[in-house]
Image (cartoon, rainbow, N blue to C red):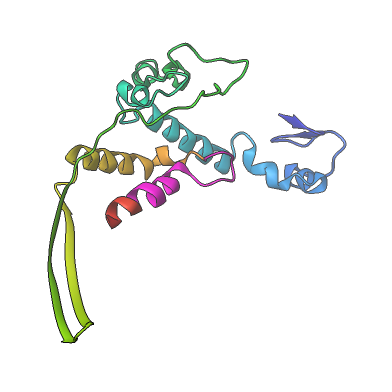
Amino acid sequence: MVWSGVTAGRSAPGWPGGQDAQLELLGLRQWQRLLDGSAQYIATNAYSAQIVNAWLNVPLPDAYFGSYNVTPAIHPSLAHASGQLDAAYLNGYNDLTAPNIGGGSNFGDHVTTVDNQSKGVEIELTTQLLRNWNVTLNYSHVNATHSDIDPAAQAFISKMTGFMNGPGGNIRMWWNGGSSLGSDWNSSIVARSRSS
């Protein structure tokens, strides 16, 4: 590998010192972690492989993306069977515009169930102190609970929380410096499902 006269792993002709001195001189010291064979490079590639493997085994059926009318159509089982993420695109992966530009989605006809129960007390006292002088006192207290929250939704959230808190959740949203899918899942789905 050659970068502006710096040959990784050995001294470039005409440059004093070894690779470290050359990188320091060229202001490329921070890029050393990307050199083939460095500990950082090996660790990054190993973790990248774990992320890809997680997405190859994403715990979602093919019908999941179709139920939201996601375009382009995605079938995770095709990626799992081939070992290639791009195989999940039903109509093929478009190398000219990669990544495939999506046309959006909609919520579909998903239904969830919950039993709501409310118990409470209401007391109202009304009196007429004098003619045309009416006084009313009212007190109420309600205790509302949710029970039998959709077991299918609970199982889905549990399964996806495990996935999102593993290597699969370390994909960045929107750009490399953005938050991860996992952190967004935890703040927007898990936290809300626990608070209801």
- Residue 51, quarter of the rendered image: top left
Q: Nearer the viewer, residue 176 or 67?
A: 67
Task: Examine the rendered structure and indicate whether residue 45 appears above or below residue 136.
Answer: above
Q: Nearer the viewer, residue 6 or 93?
A: 93
> Is 189 placed left or right of 147 in the picture?
right
Residue furthest to the right = 14
Give the percent coordinates (x, y) of residue 21: 78, 47
Give the percent coordinates (x, y) of residue 195: 29, 57
Instruction: Please give the name of the residue rendered at 14% of the width and 82% of the height, measured from the top-left corner.
Output: 127
All told, the count of numbered labels is 0
* 185 in magenta: yes
Q: Nearer the viewer, residue 119 or 24?
A: 119
Instruction: Please give the name of the residue rendered at 74% of the width and 42% of the height, measured from the top-left corner.
Output: 19
* 156 in magenta: no
Image quarter in which the C terminus is found: bottom left
Instruction: Please give the name of the residue rendered at 44% of the width and 27% of the height, measured from the top-left corner.
Output: 105
Residue furthest to the bottom = 130
Q: Nearer the viewer, residue 84 or 40?
A: 84
> Is 125 placed left or right of 40 in the picture?
left
Task: Examine the rendered structure and indicate whether residue 156 appears above or below residue 122.
Answer: above
Residue furthest to the front = 131
Residue furthest to the top = 91
What is the span of residues highlighted in magenta in the rendered image?
A: 173-190
> Is 38 placed left or right of 68 in the picture?
right
- Residue 158, quarter of the rendered image: top left
Image quarter in which the N terminus is found: top right
